[in-house]
Amino acid sequence: MKLLLLNISIAIGCPFIGFGQFRDTLKTVEIFAKADSIHTFSVINSAVPLYQFNAEKLLNIGVRDVGEALKQVPGANIKDYGGIGGVSTISFRSLGANHTSVELDDFILPSLQSGAVNLNQFNIFGVDKLALSTGQVQHNTASAAAYQKANLISIFSTIGSKPKYQTEIQAMGGYQTIQLGQIGLLIKQRINKKFTIGIQAMGREGQGAYTFKYKNVDSTYVAKRSASNLKNYQVRGVLQYHHKKQHLLLSSSWNQQSQKLPGAVILYNPFNHQFLSQNQTNTQLKYHFDNSKHYFGAQSFYRNGTTLYTDSAYLNSLGYLQNTYNIKEKGAGVMYRYFLGSKTQSVFIGSDFVSGSLNGSQYSATPHRRELISVIGFTKWLYRFKIQSNLTHQYIKDESLTQVNNYDKLSPLIAIAYLPFHQEKIRFRAHYKNTYRLPSFNDLYYNLIGNKNLQPENVTAINTGITYSKKWPATALEISIDAYQNQITNKIVAIPTQNLFNWSIQNIGNVKATGMDISLQILKKFQNFTVITNIGQNLNKSVDQTPENIFSYGHQIPYTPTYNATYNLALVLKAHYFNINMMHTGSRYTLNQNITENYLPGFIDLSISYSYKYSLKKYSDLSFYIHLNNIIGKNYEVIKSFPMPGRHVIFKLIFNLKK
């Protein structure tokens, strides 16, 4: 049956090859391409919502990691637990972190244990490009697994990209007034015409201490956040081979992090006794051949990770808790793409196989998951219509000591963009995607609460939008408006059973998310300077539609604001860059019931930054960055009882050599 459906998809796509070509001549507006590019924008020639950042703007807007950068995207809700060691995950359009894949240089990062990837671990140093897309993957080098989930975060590194110079060196040093220092070194050297080597090393150390004001019940008190100590060291080496249309990349990385976990501030207690230590090694190999007619890619990876969690104040007979976890994952995959006259039109097919196992002291079994992900699809212009479609098939086999679970799922996507006028850059777009997320190892096997009979969480996503771009001699305008609806069934939720200490994870929840994303960018060039304005707006009504939940039916789901907005104003004056950024997050509720006791007020985060680039010699420059974050100084809460840092300053110095 699966093969029949795949053959039907091919039969539908192949007749399109015979139609006349209508090439996608609309490229990203010129102002987004080089030094004066807008730091966050919706790509107007995409059939699905797509947002991109380049390396320069990631530095200029004063963000530290990928999670902070994605706060600029309309519809992205970054859940940040505060402090320099806090976890940062994304919820995009009310779809949790489990519905968003993260790829680094075309390799999907595994997340078998919790189902989510911590975005705090990706420092922007060494990031060449960052993108967030929903629906269809928008770059040709992606693996089959990238098409699986509803959303995709793409991170492209400097040392993993094709070499542009004979020698590239970057050195970075930075300090934050919440007591965090960091250093980094990146070297990329072309050995000859075919081989290039690269190495990147980073280190972060600090206490993450900051004073905060917190309202607890009927009083306000002042305390110091001191349980955020962090030590993190990362090293990554890359060997590249280029010959004509062939590219081979071998990458190996090591990441060691030890930190205190900033706990919830409850009952006048800002302290925490939890400690986390992680050690990970990753090795990846990728080969691809790419010319005007064909693309073929093959890749493999191996990952070994160890986690140690300690709570020295845990209330049990031992007086402490210590859990250890070891996860091993390996996989391989292939992708073939045939281009139909241009790189914007193609037919593609691919498969990825992933195998992973987890040993943990808090697991009732030793789970082992084998996963086969296949995709077939096409992108084609028909007159003024751009059509993208794919069908993904996922087969998973979970094995434990006591049970075997099999999952089998087909997920279709269809996206259509319509270009009504050849000269005017206005476009209508719509897409439909059915997807799901598989229960994580924690959901299935964690002691006391795991449910081995969980079914995948299903999502039906619909998006309709319009984009428009206009360019004058000294002015450029871009606007995108997208309305969406996500229907979630079999939602995986945790509910209390006997008492508050015994919980059960079940498939009982239904959620309907309806919203709108608006993005506006304006660039104005004057005689001696340039002004760039960026505005992002998000409206989101995500309500519980589970009939059994009589006390929360029709209520907004937890930690989902009905309104979000970002405002950014940048002034570029030769080598000087001034930036003002404001983020407004609306009020939320911390639990399912929208009652006063669960109300969490909204907040405004206002920051300013300044950077200056000084040319040293023909091939080198020195850049200085200073960012004043949270000017208002309020210790707002993204997550209840986790106050964020107040007013603080970030200093950064970066040396670049390219020749």
Image (spheres, rainbow, N blue to C red):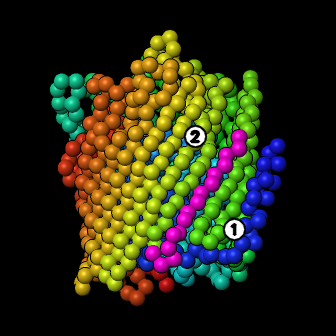
Which of these two is toward me, 561 or 453? 561
Q: Is residue 418 found inside the magenta-colored segment of the image?
A: yes
Locate residue 557, reporting x and y percent. Answer: 42, 33
Residue that lies at the very extreme toward the bottom in this rendered image: 618
Q: For the magenta stretch, what is the residue range?
A: 409-424
Q: Residues within 10 Å of mark 1 (few under 14, many from 20)?
A: many
Which of these two is toward me, 552 or 243? 552
Q: Which mark is residue 346?
A: 1
Q: Which mark is residue 151?
A: none
Q: Is residue 126 found inside the magenta-colored segment of the image?
A: no
Residue 601 occupies quadrant:
top left
Residue at the spot 39% in from the left edge and 43% down from the top edge: 540
Q: What separation in Å lies between label 2 and label 1 (alpha carbons)?
A: 27 Å
Instruction: Specify the amino acid type for callout 1.
Output: Ser
Label 1 secondary element: strand
Residue at the spot 73% in from the left edge and 30% down from the top edge: 405
Residue 175 sits above or below residue 442 on the image:
below
Instruction: Specify the amino acid type for callout 2.
Output: Val
Locate residue 153, reporting x and y percent. Answer: 52, 55
Residue 88 sits above or below residue 656 on the image:
above
Instruction: Compare marks 2 and 1 and give the one earlier in the sequence.
Output: 1
Residue that lies at the very extreme toward the top in this rendered image: 498
Query: Where is mark 2, residue-wise?
Result: 459
